Structures are given as structure tokens and as C-alpha cells.
Amino acid sequence: MSMVLALLAHDTPAGDIAMYFGYVALGVVVPGTLIWRACSPVRGGLAVDLSGGTAVGCAAEVLAYIAARAGNEPRWFLAWPLATMITFTVTPRLRRHWRVAPGAWRMPAGPAWSLTGLVAVVVIWAATILYQWHGLRWPGNANPYVDMPFHLSLVGELKHHVPPMVPQVLGEPLSYHWFVYAEMAATSWATGIEPETLLFRLSMLPMGTAFVVLIAALGKRVTGSWW
């Protein structure tokens, strides 16, 4: 809820918010969680499963999008979540992954509230630093941080070309880490949301949340304790 309120308070269209989180839930998190549960040896509980599923889903989304965009049919990447969910529904031995595994980790109240606080820090940082200084309309978008137009150009490049080229230099291949831009480009094709809204508002929230939870899960896996 705090994410939605922060977004609405900074001129993010309500329709874009609903479309984005609906797509992330059904097109990324659910199929990614099914794959995570099928492949992971960790019975991490719902929060860990959803966070791991977000990471797996983003990776699968990017790989599917690269293939679809290279074939000049960018929206065909949307077949992967549908195929995944159908497979896990019709295959008897895979149906159990729709449920939390028996014996999954139970996070104590203290660590759970601590993680909630860390996620709140991510939202507060976004609202007070990123959103505050990067508007979606004039004059709020008149003076962005120097790197942001570059990032936005890479989202635009990946939305229209794979393999990508340097947008500012004709004929120069892009030798840069660009998977995150492919993820935003895919989301833009899936939802119709402008790349600027994804970059300046939406995309970092589920990624940041999943990162916080997965770091805690890694600590639990390595040390055997949530603290």
C-alpha cells in the first residue's frame, strides 16, 4: 500500500500502476515462483518464494524477450508465462508447486518486521530522492540526474532493437550491461506503459523488494539464523 500511495503522490497514473502490478504478478512473479519452487532446494516460505520467483521471472522474461525481439515479434515473449502456468497446472507432479511446500521456513516476527522496515526504506528513498527530482511532466522532468537520459535511451533502444546498438553512435554495438533495460522494454511492450514511467517510477520497486528479502534468505541459508 505504501508503494501505491508514494506513486500516486508523485503523478504516476493510477491506470499505469494497476496495469504494471497486474502484469508483474501474473507475467513475472507467479510463473517465476513456480519455477523457483520446482528447482530450489530451499523451502523458504511464501515471502522467500515470491522474491525468488521475481528474480527467476525477470530472468526468464528477459531471455524470452531477447528471442522475440530478435525475431521482430516483441510481444511473443508473453507466451512464456502462459506456457509455464499451463505446464504446472496440467502436469500432475508439478501441481504441488502452486502451494507453499510443507515444512517451509517460518520467519519470526522480529526479522519479518525488520524486513518490512527495510522495504519501507526503499520506498521512502524512492519517494524522497528519485521521485522528488524526476517528474513525469514539465517542469519536473526538466533537470534529471545526468545519467537518467542515458538509461532512458537504452530502454528505448532495447524496445526496438536486439542486439542493441549505442543509441548515440550510429553502427556501434552496445558493449554494456543491458539486461535491466531489456526487462523494462519487455514490460513496456506488455503493458503499454511508457519507458520513462517504468524507469523513473515503477520498475525499481519489485526489484528492490525482492533483493531485500533474498539477501535475508541468503543469510538464513548460510548461517542457519534470521539474525
Image: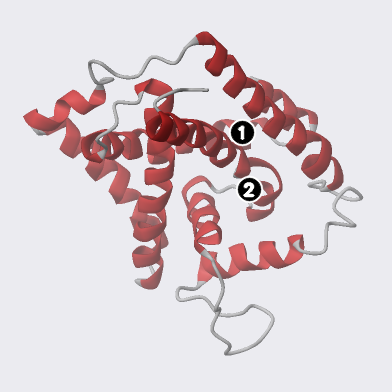
Tell me where residue 219 appears, x and y as whole percent: 46, 33
Front one among 40 and 32: 40
Q: Distance between the residues labelled 1 and 2?
A: 10 Å
Pick out the residue farthest to the front.
223
Q: Is mark 2 on a helix, strand or loop?
A: helix
Please rate how many residues cluster around mark 2, counting C-alpha atoms within 10 Å: few if below 14, some from 14 to 19, many from 20: many
Instruction: Determine the residue positioned at 25% across, 25% down.
Output: 98
Indicate the quadrant containing the N terminus: top left, top right, bottom left or bottom right: top right
Front one among 175 and 167: 175
Q: Left of 135 or right of it: where is 184?
A: left
Q: Residue 52 carries which label?
A: none
Please rate how many residues cluster around mark 1, counting C-alpha atoms within 10 Å: few if below 14, some from 14 to 19, many from 20: many
- Which is nearer the N-term, disc 1 or disc 2? 1
Q: Left of 88 or right of it: where is 16?
A: right
Instruction: Determine the residue positioned at 40% across, 41% down.
Output: 28
Three-letter code for the amino acid on which mark 2 is drawn: Leu
Instruction: Determine the residue positioned at 74% across, 28% down.
Output: 6
Please give the residue where the numbered disc 2 appears in the rendered image: 198
Tell me where residue 126 appears, x and y as whole percent: 74, 38
Front one among 75 and 133: 133
